Amino acid sequence: MSTPDDALERLLEGNKRFVSGSSVHPNRCEETRRNLESAQRPYAVILSCSDSRVPVEIIFDVGFGEVFVVRTAGHTLSQDVMGSIEYAVQELGVQLVMILGHNNCGAVKSAVKTYSDEDSRGAGNVQAILDHIYPAVKKTCSCCDAGSKDFIDKAVKENVRYQVSELIKKDRYIAALLKFNQIKVVGAYYDIAASTIELLD
């Protein structure tokens, strides 16, 4: 892809095909697989939730070698995740970084449930994930009624925005490239029922 905006447009066009039921399933033939055997050149890196209802390659109608996907519960950042994103940008020439959340996210639901009830918090690695989501829950609580119908989805979107800001704040390499417009970092939200992608501010 020639620019980060081109890469984003390519992803959004793929999602439009998926939504309309006209997916073309590109780059999934034997010839493509053989050509990619020695090297890859994806045009986007996507950090998404591990949720089984969000198969990234399918919802963007992409094939082999097009996107570099990193998945964690709640699309949360860690040093390993940031290292994976850096690898895609530095070593593979990726120009677009997308952090993708989705409605009805179980990890965010757990974070909302345990945020104000310390007795229900778990120990170990699951709790470490929730700790990364709590800042987004806290901000959502400050502006929305926690009992409102769409509170979870507002918290999901806030979590996407929070993870984007954390990536830019904590990853000096990504922040430097972003400053000089060499890459683009975007947050996005996937609606499971509608299959649509919404770009977030």
Image: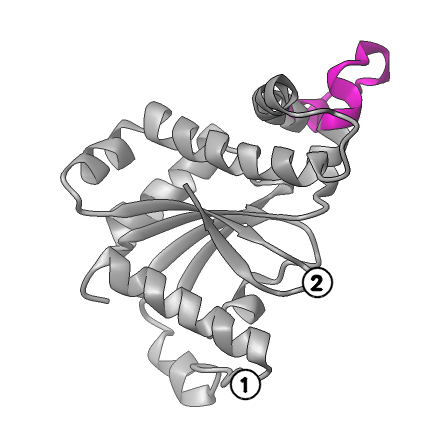
Kindly give the residue lying farthest to the right in the view shown.
Answer: 119
Classify 80 as above or below 68. Answer: above
Closest to the observer: 166 or 145?
Answer: 145
Which residue lies under the disc numbered 1? 22
Rendering quarter of residue 44: bottom left
Horizontal side of residue 71 vs 149, given as left or right:
left
The amino acid beneath tag 2 is Ala
Q: Position of residue 191 (x, y in %)?
A: 63, 56
For label 2, the SS is loop
Label 1 environment density (alpha carbons within 10 Å; few <14, some 14–19, many ≥20): few
The amino acid beneath tag 1 is Ser
Rendering quarter of residue 110: top right
Label 2 environment density (alpha carbons within 10 Å; few <14, some 14–19, many ≥20): few
For label 1, the SS is loop
The segment highlighted magenta reads 112-128
Which residue shows up at 20% across the image and 60% down it?
Answer: 3
| Main secondary structure type of the part rendered in magenta | helix
123 in the magenta segment: yes
Q: Position of residue 45 (x, y in %)?
A: 40, 53
